[in-house]
Amino acid sequence: MNEIKFTYDLASLAYPFVQEITVPRGARGILTVRGTVSRDVSYAITAHVAEGASLTVDDFIETSAHCKAALAVLLEGKGASLTDNSRYHGRGTAQFEIERAVVHTGAETVSHLEARGVVEETARAVWRGRIRVEKSAQKAHAVQNHHALLAGAKAYMDASPVLEIFTNDVVCGHSASVTRVKKESLFYLQSRGVPRKEAEQHIINGFLYG
């Protein structure tokens, strides 16, 4: 299988950044968007996935600034697939506006979206996920999950996963959860000699990468 890599380093891009990519028939695409940034960033990426092709998304953003990120994936050919592993981490006064859209138009297409985010201190995040299954996408399979961890008394999260289904032979599901750093977890680590700040970081890392 032909492998195509699309790699974007957030620290080196000029913003606003807009990009359109295509994974051709039978190919395997890998989209990597990564960076730790302290300036405002804004990007929009649209991906077209053809028949029998697959796209894997490896996305990690860490910032203390304003980040506006949009990704749209169009599963256009029969058997096209998407695996999207998205991670984001806001520190200080960070503000996230994240949009994820997956459109199934081809039959027997598959998408699996797994997003996790952490907001610390007074950081804020708004996450919008949308899966649209068109009438032509018979036997599609689509799942989207979003989980967030609040690690600050004034941290804020608003997550909204949405399904739009226009055919009757599909398997779809979605979920969203928001939790806070548990006092019991902090106590457990501190009782074993781990300083509080380090204990919080262990919990955050475990949530993001566990």
Image (spheres, rainbow, N blue to C red):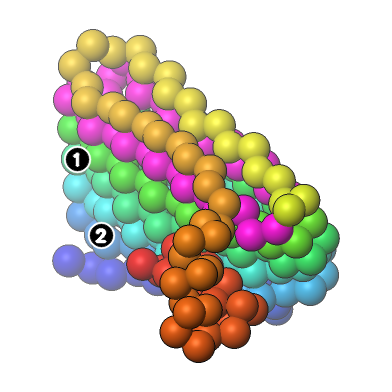
Most frequent secondary structure within the magenta stretch = strand
**Which amino acid, mark 2?**
Ala
Q: Is residue 62 left or right of residue 106?
A: right
Q: Is residue 60 left or right of residue 43?
A: left
Q: Please identify the quadrant where the C terminus is shown.
A: bottom left
27 relative to 81, above or below: below
Residue at (65, 43) in percent of width and height: 157
Q: Identify the residue at horizontal 60%, vertical 42% (top origin).
A: 127
Magenta span covers which residues?
124-152
Q: Position of residue 44 (x, y in %)?
A: 64, 51
**x and y percentages locating residue 98 in the rendered image:** 63, 46
Picture coordinates of residue 108 (x, y %)? 18, 32
Label 2 sits on residue: 27
Please tell me whether mark 2 sits on a helix, a strand or a loop. loop
Report the side of 162 relative to 127 (left or right): left
Q: Which residue is mark 1?
A: 79
Name the residue furthest front: 191
In the rendered structure, does residue 174 fall within the stretch colored magenta?
A: no
Is 131 or 148 nearer to us in this picture? 148
59 over 190 or under it: above or below: above
As drawn, 201 above or below 51: below
